Image: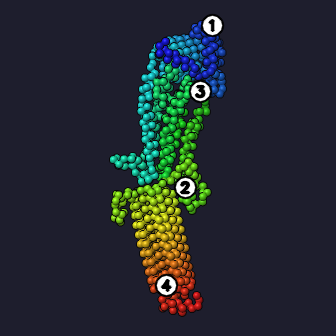
Amino acid sequence: MSTSGQRKLGERSRMGLEINALKEIEELKIDAGGTAAGGETSSGGDSTAISLIELAEILDQHKIWAESGGESGAKADLTGVNLAKADLTGVNLQGAHLHRMNLAGADLSMANLRGASLVRSNLQNSNLLGTELRGANLMGANLYGAEGLWFGRLGGTNLFDSVLPESISAVDSSKAIGDATKVARWFYFLTMGVSAVCLLLIAFTSDVRLLVNSSALHTTRLGNLLPMTGLYLGGPLVLLALSLRFHFLLLRLWGSMAALPAVFPDGQTLEKDGPWYLMGLVRRHFRWQGESRSTMIAFETVLSTVLAYWVVPATLFFFWLRYLPRQDFRGTLLHVFLMTLSVATATCVPFVVSRVLRPGDIRIPKSKNILRMILGTTRAALATGFILFVISLGVNRGLPADRNASAGESPSDPRRWAALVFQSVGYRPYADLTEAALSTPPPRGAVWDDETVEGIAGAHLNQMNLRFARGYRAFLINAKLWRANLEGAYLSEADLRGANLREALLKSAILDRVQLTHAVLVSANATGTNLSASDLRFADLSYGTFENAVLSNARISGASLYAVNLRNAQLLRTDLSRTDMRDTKLEHAVLSFANLEQADLSSARLAEADLTGARLKGTILLDADLKKADLRGASLTGAVLREVEMDGANLAGADLRGALGITSRQVCSALHGRSALMDPELATEVQLRCGSSQ
């Protein structure tokens, strides 16, 4: 036997083992035995006669069964019945058992035989004009000489070993499938390629490059051809568009396949004519091919399904995950929306394919409920979108898992749940800028003087959300951080010289030993911020809020603190010499041993402030409020104290020598005024005015 003959015989043997229903196999065995004993079925010698009344009853019950979706009535079973030359015009036998029937010369025009089983039935010279045969099992049937048979009515049929009219049997299936898959294959590889490139770019994305919106491509020749915002906001849109286009092409391909027989007379199947990565998607939807249990076929089916349906959702998931540290909530919502659409596509398309490729199935009436069908097929997508939205909200509005990043909040605060979820898998959804250079550093070997610092191009981070970012020793000289959100950020020892932090949110941030010389913090909110040992010389902090902030040992000389709110602030040993502190609010602030020499504290509010040991030589305190302030051991030599309210202030050991504008009334209104060091004239006035009251 030749090689082609052996291959053909092997294919026929394989198809013989893949018959859809066990009942059909048993009936074929019975029929084979009967044929061996009494001749061929097509002759009608062993056919059974049936009365017209009985036939009408069977047809009526079957019609009820078909219209009710199988819930009532009875499915027709006309196995072996002889209806040769019968008039069956327009009859409804959808899904009926019609094995070994003799329908030679019968008129079946406009009949509905969708999904019917006509195994080894005789339809020679029958009239099949307009007859619906989609999904029918015509294995071993004889349709030679049938009139009006149209190839388009044979979609999804099993024609194995059947005898067809010459016009039908001459159709070449391989060319039709090859042409139909050509464009789909191109979009398939394009989608897979774009997904692979996106995953590669995501893998090489650092938090620094993501925040400063640098080029996603690691090349200097092309410049910033593809910025990070373009990749992370435009990339998912392009990828989803390619995916949708690919799936629309697939639906057209499946529609073309649905118009072709599932199994051809020689045993050839549609999947053999197309690429495995496309045919594997529909193999389980063909009723004559879904029974295969081959390990290789099962592997191909699973792999093709994962690649075609789930690569894009997986890529979009990594887009969402990697974009979280930027804390752009609108961009994250876009990712959640696109992710929901991609999952809906991955779950709904197989359902649509099953409807297209299973034309012989009886539809259950409940499936007509469109709303229920939509919810049933999209519930996975809706659940995915809801979960991602809640997690995104928890990250963008919640707290980090590490407690030291939000010291003012409870360790058991429920807002930490999202970060704890990520921490369990070793991921922190907040930016890591440790020792990173966000601003452009000067060339190597450059002299670090004021001119060099002024010439550094600062990072553009205006209105950037950097909540709870880690930026230890980050390089942010001349950075543009207008209205940036740095709540809870860890920027210890960072270099922010010349940075613009106007209206920035620095609540509870860690900025100890940070360099902020010549920085602009106008109207910044630094409530509870740790600025201990920081360098704020010549910085502009006007109208800022530094309530409860820690500025101990900080250097702020020459800075502008006009109308700054420093209530309850810690300014222990802070250098505030030559600063503009007019209208500053320092109630309950700790200024022990602080250097306030030659500072302007006109109209400042220092009620109940702790100024023990503070140096106020030459300080202007015109119209300041020092009620109940603690000035023990403070040096006020040469200070301007005109119109200062000192009621209840503790002046024990204070040095008031050379103070300008101070009166005996002010001293007498304070506590322990007589124990203060004063000029002789003032001391005499105090002695006379206060007497023995102190």
Q: CA distance from mark 2 to mark 4?
A: 51 Å
Q: Earlier in the sequence, mark 4 or mark 3?
A: 3
Q: Which of label 4 and label 3 is nearer to you?
A: 4
Residue 463 visible in the shown view: no
**Mark 1 sits on what residue?**
37
63 or 346, which lies in front?
Answer: 346
**Mark 2 sits on what residue?**
400
Above or below, comparing residue 162 to residue 503 in the picture: above
For mark 2, give the secondary structure. loop
Residue 230 image offset from top left, x and y in percent: 41, 47
Residue 348 image offset from top left, x and y in percent: 53, 36
85 or 258, which lies in front?
Answer: 258
**Mark 4 sits on what residue?**
656
Residue 99 image offset from top left, x and y in percent: 60, 16
- Image marks 2 and 4: residues in contact by CB distance under 8 Å: no
Q: Earlier in the sequence, mark 2 or mark 4?
A: 2
Residue at point 51% right, 65% down?
Answer: 530
- Image marks 3 and 2: residues in contact by CB distance under 8 Å: no
Q: Which mark is residue 362?
A: 3
For mark 3, give the secondary structure. loop
- Image marks 2 and 1: residues in contact by CB distance under 8 Å: no
Q: Which of label 4 and label 1 is nearer to you?
A: 4
Above or below, comparing residue 33 to residue 471 in the picture: above
